[in-house]
Image: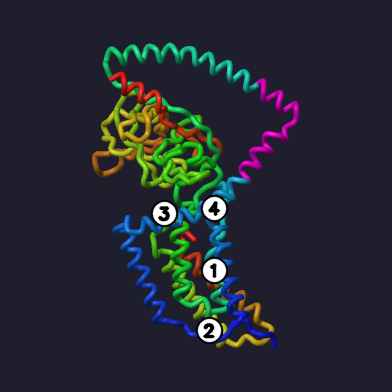
Amino acid sequence: MKSKAFLITGMIASFIVASTLSVYPLQHTLASIRPSFMVMVMIFWVMYRSSMMSVWAVFLVGLASDLLLGTHLGYQAFCAVLTALVLRIMMLYSERANFGAGMVWGKCGSVCLSSGVMDTSCFGVW
Amino acid sequence: MLPSIFSQKPLFIRMTIGFLVAALILMLLDSKNPEWFSPLRSLSHASMQPIYQVSVGPSYAMEYAQGSLHSKEALRRENIRLQTELLQARAKLQRQDYLLAQNAHLNGILSTTLSNQHDLSLAQVIGTDSNPLKQVVILNKGSRNGIEIGQTVIDENGILGQIINVYDNTSRLLLITDEQQSVAVQVARTGQRAMVSGGGMPDSLNLDYIFKTADVKVGDELISSGLGGRIPAGYKVGTVSNIDTTRTDNFADIKVAPSADFLRSSYVLVLKPKVDAATAEGNNR
């Protein structure tokens, strides 16, 4: 129980840090290559504790980044929910494919790669 | 076997579909009635304010470093350069005084209103907005320095845009290259009135609603006409860089190269209306 409270605190803190980094004013050249911190942190939490990062939490994170980045309300929430779904399907698939003991990081890499491809194809702005 | 960090999870298909539909509905509502969500947006901007506040620090540090870490030789050279520039500027100003006096005289004859006088206050650009597709930059001066919403910002070459949000020590500047911005201009050579709109790119503007037969040439200078009532008259906006008459309707596609540098301007000038001049003028009427 204590560890769950700890995890939730960590999750909220990580999203606060990510939103700070995604809003912090940068020079024009740097701003164009700014990584999408919110989506990175969201993918981590969906992979690490999928039960805690449920669909409504993903939706709320998407709404928050909509407000922060000034896109249409619901646009990034839509993308985030879709990304989380694809990520879950990929993880289920990689689990059933049964790579074996030494392939945990390979699995991790494949999931990251596929979600990254999904991410770039789905969002222009993030 | 390594403990897997992936545990078995459900997919929540129904919930996902529900939230996707909710997001679609929100998008539709936001595009139809953006004003419904404006309190939420202003709340989020207010929550960003502390982050902007923190980011002012490095810009002051850079300014301090630039001011204190110069060699003596470089300072001497810069001093000489600035003195020559000052001399040239003063020489130009002499003519300017004469022109101003003549202009006031002519205005008196024509009994037109005097153009507004402005105070200039220097501000520094500390960064772009969180969304690089939006043409918004953040300045390090705010309401404590007398910045107000709607004030026009220029750099040494031309108009940059206007202030849209003001906080204590920072403010947000919407550039005229934004898709939602337009400036009332006139062509300096012919005096023809027109409108320049942004296209969302930092290096080009569009001159709208000019007939194909109109007298506009490549290289014509565009100067703000002040007709919109927001941006004062007489400041440079850009020069016509390309005219394309292959469109099917009566209007030409005219590209304008902006005179202000939207990418590299680090110091900008905020135009504040001179209060005493305006009231004095009002009393004279």
- With respect to residue B244, does A91 lie above or below? below
Q: Are marks 2 and 3 in contact (CB under 8 Å)?
A: no
For residue B67, side relative to residue A57 (left or right) = right
Q: Which residue is mark 4?
A: B50
Q: Which residue is mark 2?
A: A92
The residue positioned farthest toward the right in the image shown = B72
Q: Chain of mark 1?
A: A
Label 3, label 1: how many angstroms apart (C-alpha)?
32 Å
Q: Which residues are magenta?
A: B58-80
Label 4, label 3: how many angstroms apart (C-alpha)?
14 Å
Q: Which residue is mark 3?
A: B42
- Tag 4 and tag 1 share a subunit: no
The amino acid type found where label 3 is placed reads Ser
- Quadrant the N terminus of chain B occupies: bottom right
A36 or B187, which is in the foreground?
A: A36
The amino acid type found where label 2 is placed reads Leu
Q: Position of residue A37 (x, y in %)?
A: 56, 62
Q: Position of residue A61 (x, y in %)?
A: 48, 67
